[in-house]
Image: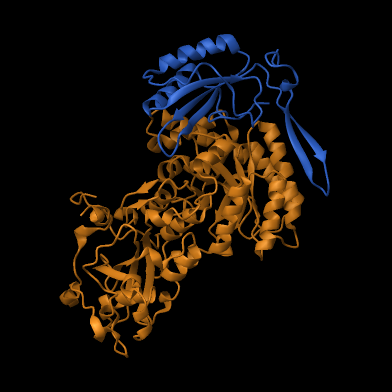
Chain colours: A orange, B blue
Amino acid sequence: MPQNELTTRSIPTNRRTPPKESDMNMHSMTVRGKDRYKSGVLEYRKMGYWEPDYAPKDTDIIALFRVTPQDGVDPIEASAAVAGESSTATWTVVWTDRLTAAEKYRAKCFRVDPVPNSPGQYFAYIAYDLDLFEPGSIANLSASIIGNVFGFKPLKALRLEDMRLPVAYVKTFQGPATGIVVERERMDKFGRPLLGATVKPKLGLSGRNYGRVVYEALKGGLDFTKDDENINSQPFMHWRERFLYCMEAVNKAQAATGEIKGTYLNVTAGTMEDMYERAEFAKELGSVIIMIDLVIGYTAIQSMAKWARRNDVILHLHRAGHSTYTRQRSHGVSFRVIAKWMRLAGVDHIHAGTVVGKLEGDPATTRGYYDICREDYNPMRLEHGVFFDQHWASLNKLMPVASGGIHAGQMHQLLDHLGEDVILQFGGGTIGHPMGIQAGATANRVALEAMILARNEGRDYLHEGPEILAKAAETCTPLKSALEVWKNVTFNYESTDMPDYVPTPSVAM
Amino acid sequence: MRITQGCFSFLPDLTDEQISRQVQYCLENGWAVNIEFTDDPHPRNNFWEMWGLPMFDLRDAAGVMMELNQCRKAYGNSYIRLSAFDSSHGWESVRLSFIVNRPKEEPGFHLERHEVAGRNIRYTTKSYAADRPEGRRYG
């Protein structure tokens, strides 16, 4: 059946092992006819929320949950309950179901697998009909999929691991306001990662002092500087002061270098009206980019994405707050889902991990996030935590940002892990340079250009990295000094989140 | 001053051998390399003059290097850059761009400030060299 071709490929069929406790569960137990609507309580798996024979349609949204049932709760029943509570069900049978095309609107759990090496956890695949969702609204999508069900008592924990978004649904979203290609054209920067830095200290600088940091970093060789997530409008620096001094710095650095420069002016505020006012002012001052925080909420993000598209301004998103629900493996929402939602919502930049820096990020999982941001098609890659084939239907690409605890000495590793279409943000690694901010920026830019040159020449830059950097440092004292100061800085801690599937030579992926 | 547009402006000027290796990298990726020159390097001057068309279907970097040397003979005291165009779906733009020739002296830019209402300032970046007519901007 041609309709099912894509869906069978998109789901890992090679590991279909039924949970031992209930072989019976592989068959539909749905009660049909009059009995289905007798008043009272019926198990979710009998109400039509467990349909193991259901073949998902190309237009269905599919969600993959990691379900940890309470002790004694059957995993199939728990998974059916997730399907039910995230779609049409309530705790008891209601006759009003019979006024609707209820079977269409019921989410259907069609597959439950034990999670490898994690006793008590199950992967539940749930299909949702497209008509359950309002077009172009992340708020509606998330209210359905994660709205109620995460507090459901029969579950110990629940995590939304991944989603397959059908093209029919993807096409209802604007997508990134600018996208990687147009951002590069506007910034006139091709062939290398872009460089940025977050102004530090993150709190306390006056507008004038703040602009000084921006000027030094941009003149020294960075492409962007950035407000931190909690720089909004505080007693030490009101937002207009920051915007005015930053734009003086940007324009001065542009004239000094002949390059286009930008600074992410954070327009996050208490109300939409305030955000629009700040964004308008940033535009009026000629800023190429503004910034928002994830905590403003999905609807506000989509509003700002539309504003950014209308006004030719790049939109940077700082994922402030995400670790509260993305970090733990058993409960919450995986960042790969947030990345997918944000690509739909329409931001241009998103922080997606550094692998080598100070913040959480296993290399394989991070690779999965980067692919979701940048590719037009993501094939299923269990070893990167990507559970579904995902077509993006030419939606603009979203530029990932690597920020937090990285420095010039890691340039070869960064390029290897993260590739070329990324913004590398060296905050401390620029501003903390012993010879000053300009020198710090220059060190990073020289290290980057030397590494790109070597890569393009076909050198084994990952292994020869330290050598390439040392050679470049011979004609660049700032780089020499950066390599010396941070030579032993690494952040090696165990990740709290990593893929459940590890590739083995015998398995064809 | 030194204009730092392009991918390798922070490194010492590339030798012809280094340029040729970058060109080879572009050709192996299936990108068409174009030679462009200008005496108006304003950061928002996107359209430098084209030295012929992008060189499609080329296999060997030597072809680009030959053209580059011709271009240098004619415009040796201008900015010359190489740009590589990728026609694949989803990109269809420049993949790599770097400066391969500069005028002997780079006078740089003047920042004009026009004070307007509030504390707002309108900025204009002007090339010192661009005050003179095209073709007579660098000596």
Looking at the rendered image, the quarter that the N terminus of chain A falls into is bottom left
Residue furthest left as drawn: A23
Residue extending furthest front? A99
Count the marks: how many?
Answer: 0
| A221, A422: nearer the viewer | A422
Identify which residue, B9 or B12, lies in the foreground.
B9
Q: Residue A83, can we see it?
A: yes
Asked if one can make out residue B101 in the rendered structure from this viewpoint, the answer is no
Residue A122 position (above or below residue A96) = above
On the image, the x and y values in percent for residue A183 come to: 55, 41
Q: Is residue A271 left or right of residue B31?
A: right
Against A278, residue A64 (above or below) is: below
Please tell me which residue is depicted at 28% across the width and 62% down the height of the picture: A56
Q: Does A400 sit above or below residue A483?
A: below
Q: Is residue A102 above or below residue A217?
A: below
**Image spot of residue B92 (x, y percent):** 45, 34
Q: Nearer the viewer, residue A206 or A148?
A: A148
Q: Nearer the viewer, residue A353 or A268?
A: A268
* Residue at x 74%, y 17% (from the top left corner): B132
Q: Position of residue A67 (x, y in %)?
A: 33, 72
**Residue A40 horizontal side relative to residue A417, left or right:** left
The location of residue A24, given as percent across then percent down, is 16, 76
* In the image: residue A309, left or right of residue A120: right
